Image (spheres, rainbow, N blue to C red):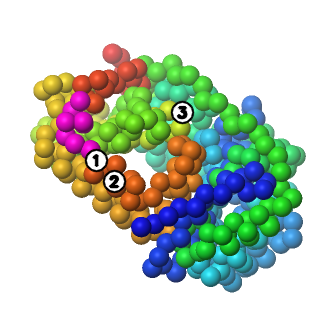
């Protein structure tokens, strides 16, 4: 049986380590409270600038020297801005962990942040914004989130053209150390490692790191309701959002089963009712995302303008029908959903990167990490009766519908 070791480092950071038998690799997932929610007013996109500039050298190594140092160790690295968090990732052979950690620490705690790196990072961020023109589904999703959530949860993390162009080098340099602090940091390590040695090494490299910065609090709901973005396209993108249990709620696993029944591939109700039986769309799906303080279900339909309204009607009807006595989950649907969820869990357990990300995410959202065995036991304890009892009290609540396509859209 696997075991996860949890430590509070001397600097105040949380460290969780999961040794994994039978693997030679190791992975690090480091969460900082430095996501898009930290972007100053008028400078939306600062966090995405950091995600590029951190990979461009430290105070002791130039950008090329840093890249070469990681390459010599066969280590990969990444930096990713999210809404409420900022994730640093690294993967390597377990025997190389002791050499990778100092490089990663220098990258985060002593970044180089050169002027030319800002210009290059800004250009890349602006190109990413420009690429949204070729991704109408993502544009619709961003608009839907901005309607469903209040600031700062409504932020996309990509920033805005005006915000990115307003960012100066002093913003990059001054704000990063103020938000990249140990008290809010969660570091997860998984793979071919010794937990106590990992703790000792992180205590050494973090011995001078200090500070705290309270996390930004999620706001209340956004305006919600229906919104339409008119664009002369050949398709209509439809996003429907509704609230769901938080990840910490006892109902979160029940919600995942329900969403799996709705959107479990070709056997899911949405595929069957919206696409297969009626031929209304080319794509339909739904997904659950849970965090510590909120949860959301997002359903998507991509269709033609002529079939858009009927597609939304059928989609919403299926989302509501499952909460009624006539729409209860069947034994076959329940079995398929459980098998699918457990398969995903087992596959994720074979990846050190997935496990490192999972245990840091658990600590942030739940306050403690979970082993694969513990998660599987929770699934084994589910019954069809519990699922249908949950559906008897489940509601969609305040719904957001965002459409993107040609013409006007009037309810």
Question: Dot 2: within a 10 Å radius of its alpha carbon, few (fewer than 14), some, or many (20 or more) residues?
Answer: few
Q: What is the tally of numbered marks visible in this picture?
A: 3
Q: In which quadrant of the rendered view does residue 212 lie?
A: top right
Assign a secondary structure to mark 3.
Answer: loop
List the residue tagged with mark 2.
Answer: 377
* Label drawn at residue 293: 3
Question: Dot 1: within a 10 Å radius of its alpha carbon, few (fewer than 14), some, or many (20 or more) residues?
Answer: few
Residue numbers of the magenta segment: 382-389
Q: Residue furthest top?
A: 411
Nearer-N-terminus badge (1/3): 3
- Residue 101 in the magenta stretch? The answer is no
Assign a secondary structure to mark 1.
Answer: loop
Residue 357 in the image, given as x and y percentages of width and height: 53, 58
Please give the name of the residue rendered at 59% of the width and 78% of the height, measured from the top-left corner. 94
Assign a secondary structure to mark 2.
Answer: helix
Residue 403 in the image, given as x and y percentages of width and height: 39, 30
How would you classify the magenta stretch by its main secondary structure? Answer: helix
Q: Nearer the viewer, residue 228 or 57?
A: 57
Residue 388, above or below 379 = above
List the residue tagged with mark 1.
Answer: 381
Label 2 – label 1 distance at C-alpha: 6 Å
Label 2 – label 3 distance at C-alpha: 24 Å
Instruction: Mark 1 and mark 3 in contact? Answer it, CB < 8 Å.
Output: no
Instruction: Mark 2 and mark 1 in contact? Answer it, CB < 8 Å.
Output: yes
Residue 295 in the image, given as x and y percentages of width and height: 45, 34
Please give the name of the residue rendered at 56% of the width and 44% of the height, measured from the top-left corner. 367
């Amino acid at each position: 049986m696997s075991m996860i070791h949890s430590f509070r480092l001397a600097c105040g950071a949380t460290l969780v380590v999961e040794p994994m038998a039978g693997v030679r690799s190791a992975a690090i997932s480091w969460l900082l409270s430095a996501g898009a929610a930290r972007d100053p007013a008028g400078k939306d996109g600062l966090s995405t600038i950091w995600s590029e500039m951190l990979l461009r050298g430290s105070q002791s190594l130039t950008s090329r020297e840093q890249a070469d140092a990681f390459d010599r160790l066969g280590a990969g690295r990444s930096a990713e801005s999210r809404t409420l968090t900022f994730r640093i990732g690294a993967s390597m052979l377990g025997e190389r962990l002791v050499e990778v950690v100092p490089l990663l620490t220098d990258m985060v705690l002593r970044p180089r942040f050169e002027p030319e790196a800002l210009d290059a990072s800004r250009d890349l961020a602006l190109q990413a914004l420009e690429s949204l023109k070729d991704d109408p589904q993502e544009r619709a999703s961003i608009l839907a989130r901005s309607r469903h959530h209040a600031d700062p949860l409504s932020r996309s993390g990509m920033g805005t053209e005006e915000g990115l162009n307003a960012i100066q080098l002093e913003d990059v340099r001054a704000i990063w150390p103020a938000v990249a602090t140990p008290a809010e940091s969660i570091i997860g390590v998984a793979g071919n490692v010794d937990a106590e040695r990992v703790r000792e090494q992180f205590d050494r490299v973090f011995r001078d790191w200090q500070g705290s910065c309270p996390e930004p609090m999620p706001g209340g709901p956004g305006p919600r309701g229906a919104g339409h973005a008119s664009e002369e396209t050949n398709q209509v993108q439809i996003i429907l959002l509704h609230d769901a249990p938080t990840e910490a709620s006892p109902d979160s696993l029940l919600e995942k089963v329900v969403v799996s029944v709705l959107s479990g591939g070709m056997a899911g109700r949405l595929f069957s009712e919206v696409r297969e039986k009626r031929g209304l769309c080319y794509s339909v799906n739904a997904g659950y995302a849970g965090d510590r303080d909120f949860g959301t279900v997002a359903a998507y339909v991509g269709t033609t303008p002529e079939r858009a309204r009927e597609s939304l009607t059928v989609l919403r009807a299926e989302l509501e029908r499952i909460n009624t006595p006539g729409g209860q989950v069947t034994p076959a649907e329940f079995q398929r959903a459980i098998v699918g969820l457990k398969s995903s869990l087992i596959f994720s357990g074979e990846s050190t990167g997935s496990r490192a990300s999972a245990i840091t995410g658990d600590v942030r959202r739940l306050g403690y990490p979970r082993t694969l065995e513990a998660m599987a036991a929770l699934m084994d304890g589910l019954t069809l009766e519990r699922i249908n009892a949950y559906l008897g009290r489940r509601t969609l609540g305040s719904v957001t519908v965002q459409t993107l396509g040609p013409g006007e859209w009037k309810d």
